[in-house]
Amino acid sequence: MSHFAISSAALSRKLRQFVDTEIIPNEGILAQGDNLARELTLDLTRRAQQAGLFGSFYPMHRGGRIASLVEYLPVAEQEGRSEYGPGIFGADATLDVYMLSHHGSASVKQRFLTPLLKGDAVSSYAMSEPDSIGSIPATMQCQARLKDGQWHVNGRKWFICRAQLASFATVVARSADGPVNESLSMVIVPTDAAGFKVVRPLPLLGRYQGQNELLFNNVTVPEDYVLGIAGQGIALMQKRLALGRILRSVQWLGLAQRSFDIMCERIHSERGELARLADKQLVRARVYQVYRAITSARCLLREAAIKFDAGLPNSVEVNVAKLAASDAVSEAADSAIQIMGAEGLADWSPLSGIYRAARTTHILDGADDALISTVGKHLLQAHFAIQETVEMNKAVA
C-alpha cells in the first residue's frame, strides 16, 4: 500500500471532485442495493484507491494520509457529501480499523484487519438488542462464554449496519456475571461461522439503509478473537463512541452542506428567479438558519476533535456536536425540500434520501433525548463542582 501524507485542503478538493463526478451521477443505481449496485460500489472503491482517496484517516502506520482528527474533519465532510461516499472511501471502516489496530490480537489483525485495510472486507458493529435498552449496557443479554479455548456466542442483535455484506462483526456480549463494567467483552465473529445468521433486513422509514437483525446460535470463535482483555467491553465502547460520533457527525455535515448548495442553486436558477425566491424574506431566513446550523456544528465538532487529538476528556463536547450536526442536516434537508417543492420529495431527488437519513440521525448513534439528558447531568455536576470549590476557597480565606 503506497499511501503518502497529503494536505487536508488538497485531499478535500480531490474528494469533492470524485464525489461530484463519479458518485453523485450514479446514486440512482447505488440506491437500489442490488447486485449491480454492489458491483458499482466495488468498482468505485477500486477507483478511489487508485486515486489515493481510500482510508484517509486510517492510522498513519496502516496507510492513512491524515494524522490528526482536526485535519480530517474537512476531508470527512467531503466523503459524506453522498450517502454512499463513506462506504466507497473506506471511511465506514475507520472506527473498526482503529479498534482492531489497537486492541486486536495478532490473528485478528491478520485475518480481519489486513483485508479491511485493503478494502477487501466489510465490518459491522453488533451492540443493540431487541430485548434490551440501547443506552443501558447492563440490560444486554447476548452472551459470550469461554469454554475449552473457544468463545461460545449466543443471542440476538438488531439495527446492525452493513451486516448483510460484512465479513465479520464486533459483538458486544456479556462474558461473565457481575458488575457491567467488568462483565462485557467485544468478540470478533466472522459472518461465515456456523450459527451466524442474518435474520432479516430492517428498512427505516420505508427504505433499506443497511440495517439488519442478527442471530448468534452457539457461534464458536477462538479465545484470542476478543478485543483487548475480556471484561473491558465498557471501556472499549466508550473509546468507540468518542471517535465514532465525531466521524458520523461530520459526514452528516457533508449531506447538510450539499442540501444547502441544492437549495441555493434552486434560488438562483431560472425557475427561482421566476418565482423571485431570493426576494422573499422567509427564503432568506431559511438560508441564514441553515448556514448558522452548519457553521455552528462545524465549530463544535472542531472543539471535540481538538480534545480528542490531545487525549482530553470530551464526552460533553462530542455529544453536543453530535446533536448539533443532527439538527443541521435535518434543517438543511427540510429547508431545501421546502424550496424545491414536490420535486424535493421525489425519489429521484437526493433530498428524499437525505431527508430520511437525517431523521434517523436523531435516534441512531445515540438518541437525542438520552444525549441531552446525559449532557445536562454532566453540566450540572461540573457547575456544582466549581461552586463547591469556590465555597471551599472562601472558607479557607
Image: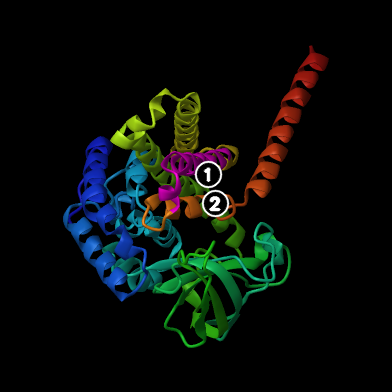
Depth order, front residue of 396/258: 258
Q: Is residue 62 left or right of residue 320?
A: left
User: Closer to the camera, 387 or 339?
Assistant: 339
Give SS at disc 2. helix
Please give left or right for residue 266 compared with residue 369 in the image.
Answer: left
Q: Which mark is residue 326?
A: 1
Q: Which residue sits at x=32%, y=44%? A: 78
Is residue 328 found inside the magenta-colored segment of the image?
yes
Q: In the rendered image, which quarter is residue 43 located in?
A: bottom left
Indicate the amino acid at tag 2: Arg
Question: x, y percentage for residue 102?
Answer: 42, 57
| Depicted 268 relative to depicted 105: above or below | above
Within the image, what quadrant is residue 27 found in? bottom left
Quick check: can you spot residue 217?
A: yes
Quadrant into which the C terminus falls: top right
Residue sitting farthest toward the right: 395
Asked where in the image residue 132 lies, by quadrant, the reply is: bottom right
Q: In this view, does 145 lie to the left or right of 356?
A: right
Is residue 394 inside the magenta stretch?
Answer: no
Q: Residue furthest top?
A: 397
Asked if residue 230 can be seen in this view, the reply is no
Range covered by the magenta-colored residues: 320-345
Question: Residue sitting at 46 percent across and 64 percent down?
Answer: 209
Q: Residues within 10 Å of mark 2 (few under 14, many from 20)?
A: some
The percent position of residue 376, horizontal first and vertical second, equals 70, 37
Say whether disc 2 or disc 1 marks the residue closer to the N-terminus.
1
Q: Mark 2 points at which residue?
A: 359
Task: In the rendered view, tell whether residue 137 sits above or below residue 311.
Answer: below
